[in-house]
Amino acid sequence: MTNRIKIVPWESDASGDASVEMDRNYMGMNIVSVQTVPGLNGDKATTTPTADYNVVINDEYGEDIMEGELADRSATAGETFYANPPLPVPGILTVIVSGAGDSKTGIVKIVLDRNY
């Protein structure tokens, strides 16, 4: 199995929200796992979000393909959701963070595998 790791850094605005469209269409791939890590570049210490912030990964039609599994994330530790079975990517994805606080940062690390 050959995995591709996509790291999506985010920074929230004054409302505590962030929206990052992924740089390409990953259709034909499956999401194997998603890890959320608070802090600047995932350092878990600098500009960390408010506890219980939320992450969704929306398809091009605004549907959360993670079905709420990335809600209430930790402000101090990385947390990983493992997709079993892996989730097919339906097209262009957008990572949306809410409730993080003003000017907070973190990363979303998505592990993808080719859909055979």
Image (tube, helix red, strand yellow):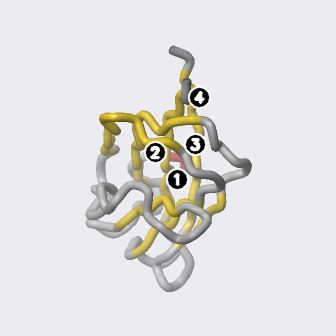
Between residues 90 and 18, which one lies in front from this camera angle? 90
Q: How far apart are marks 3 and 4 (CA)?
A: 10 Å
Q: Residues within 10 Å of mark 3 (few under 14, many from 20)?
A: some
Tag in front: 1 or 3: 3
Q: How far apart are marks 1 and 3 (CA)?
A: 13 Å
Residue type pointed to by label 1 = Leu
Q: Which residue is drawn at 56% across and 17% down?
A: 2
Q: Do the residues labelled 3 and 4 touch (CB within 8 Å)?
A: no
Position of residue 82 relative to residue 49, above or below, is above
Residue 28: percent from the left, percent from the top? 62, 37
Sooner in the amino-acid sequence: mark 2 or mark 3: 3
Residue 34 lies in what quarter of the image?
Answer: top left
Q: How crowded is mark 4: few (under 14 residues within 10 Å), some or many (20 or more)?
A: some
Q: Distance between the residues labelled 4 and 1?
A: 22 Å
Residue ID for mark 1: 40
Q: Distance between the residues labelled 2 and 3?
A: 13 Å
Q: Are marks 2 and 1 in contact (CB under 8 Å)?
A: yes
Q: Residues within 10 Å of mark 2 (few under 14, many from 20)?
A: some
Residue type pointed to by label 2 = Asp
Label 1 secondary element: helix
Residue ID for mark 3: 7
Q: Which residue is drawn at 49% across and 85% down?
A: 15
Residue ID for mark 2: 43
Residue ID for mark 4: 4
Residue 56 lies in what quarter of the image?
Answer: bottom left
Between residues 108 and 3, which one lies in front from this camera angle? 3
Compared across the picture, whether 26 is left or right of 18 comes to right
Q: Do the residues labelled 4 and 1 touch (CB within 8 Å)?
A: no
